[in-house]
Image (spheres, grey):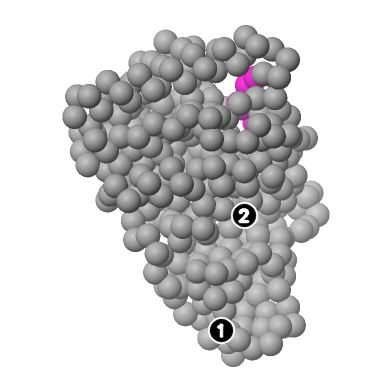
Amino acid sequence: MSDHIGGNTVNDSSRPSVDVSDLDAHMRAGAVDAAGLRWHAPTGEPIAVRGLAWFAAERRYRRLPLAPRLAIRPAVDELANCTAGAQLHLITDSRRLSLRARLGSFGLMHHMAATGQSGFDCYVGAPGAEEYVSTTIWDQKLSAITCPLYDGTQRARRSVIINFPLYQGVLELAIGIDADAALAPPEPMRIARPIVWYGTSITQGGCASRPGMAHTNILARRLGAEILNLGFSGNGQGEPELAHLLSDIPDPACLVLDFDGNCYPDEKLSGNLPEFIRIYRAVHPQVPILVMTRPPYASERIHERERIAREARVGIQQRVVEILQAAGDRALTFCDVAAILPASYVDGTVDGGHPTDLGFQLLADALAAPLRGVLRGR
């Protein structure tokens, strides 16, 4: 089964992605519209943009640098515009919260909900205890949207997390709150350093029904962590250029390597995995690394050869980790994901391979303990 999810969902990186004040007066900081909402572009405090390692430097809603120091494949470069894992964090006492955005394209995939491909969702509550309240819903023929996230609530101080689309680019964005409402920075994350997670379409969030249900976002909430989602649908192949780029992210809490599902044939996996680790270790010799295998596919239930092939790749990765551990790398951990998932996991997939919300919840439940163990080794 191919791990690729297609669809024209990327944005034009030559166009401005954040500062829209010259284009739309309603998006200027401090601008109040006819409904009494004041609009704020998240270009700096008090609104925090998390999940995008290069945002502070480039002010782009993009998961890799706009001009990477090493040439990367065009497919990876395009997929970097999809905003999987990006989040806004803020605190406000506004009775209303709305979102305006201009998206890169339209959600075109037939087996993933448009709300997961192109939607935002919103979590609200006490800091560290935010709960889901809403998802943006709009005419899918439109790329410019204005959507309420909540309305008519009592005035109260709330922590807000807004998750970005998983398979879509975001060119422009602004948040609307009551003109007289307070807006404050979010609380610090419980885990101070970011988790870097490199992988495939499953890592990117295919096929969650809304962005908050991707397992990386579930785990980010559960752990109180910033997770940099560097899943590239069909293109998480472990090439050296990505190892170098990920090494540029300073002081991570850990690195998760989750590219088994895209790195074929077996000889490519057995070569790329140790080389990726070698490149990363040259810059981050002590950062914990978790090597993960892909989940099982439903087709294994009737095709034993597919199970045997997956288990052979499990063995390849486990041997790489054991060799490096024996050579002295004590911050390297291996996780056979299939071994810790319930047998019913594949029932929580949309096509036998890509998880539904149920599948992502099962993945998050299974991976929470291994991830916490790796983080304790920091």
- Whether the magenta-drawn stretch holds residue 69 is answered as no
On the image, the x and y values in percent for residue 31 come to 58, 80
Residue under the point 80% across and 54% down = 139
Label 2 is placed on what type of residue? Answer: Gly
Q: Quadrant of residue 39?
A: bottom right
Residue of label 1: 157
Give 244 or 22, whichever is nearer the viewer.
244
The reply to whether residue 57 is visible in this rendering is: no
On the image, the x and y values in percent for residue 288 come to 30, 42
Task: Please tell me whether mark 2 sits on a helix, a strand or a loop.
Answer: helix
Q: Say which quadrant the N terminus sits in.
A: top right
Residue 37 numbered mark, or none: none
- Whether the magenta-drawn stretch holds residue 2 is answered as yes
Callout 1 crowding tier (Cα within 10 Å): few <14, some 14–19, many ≥20: some
Residue of label 2: 212
Q: Is residue 300 left or right of residue 255?
A: right
The reply to whether residue 352 is visible in this rendering is: yes
Instruction: Please say if 247 is above or below 278.
Output: below
Give 36 or 90, whichever is nearer the viewer.
90
On the image, the x and y values in percent for residue 343 come to 66, 31
Instruction: Please say if 231 is above or below 182.
Output: above
The earlier-in-sequence mark between 2 and 1 is 1
Instruction: Please say if 46 is above or below 168.
Output: below
Instruction: Please say if 116 is above or below 346.
Output: below
Residue under the point 65% across and 57% down = 120
Label 1 is placed on what type of residue? Answer: Arg
Q: For the magenta stretch, what is the residue range?
A: 1-6
Instruction: Assess whether mark 1 and mark 2 are in contact (beta carbons under 8 angstroms).
Output: no
Residue under the point 54% across and 35% down = 340
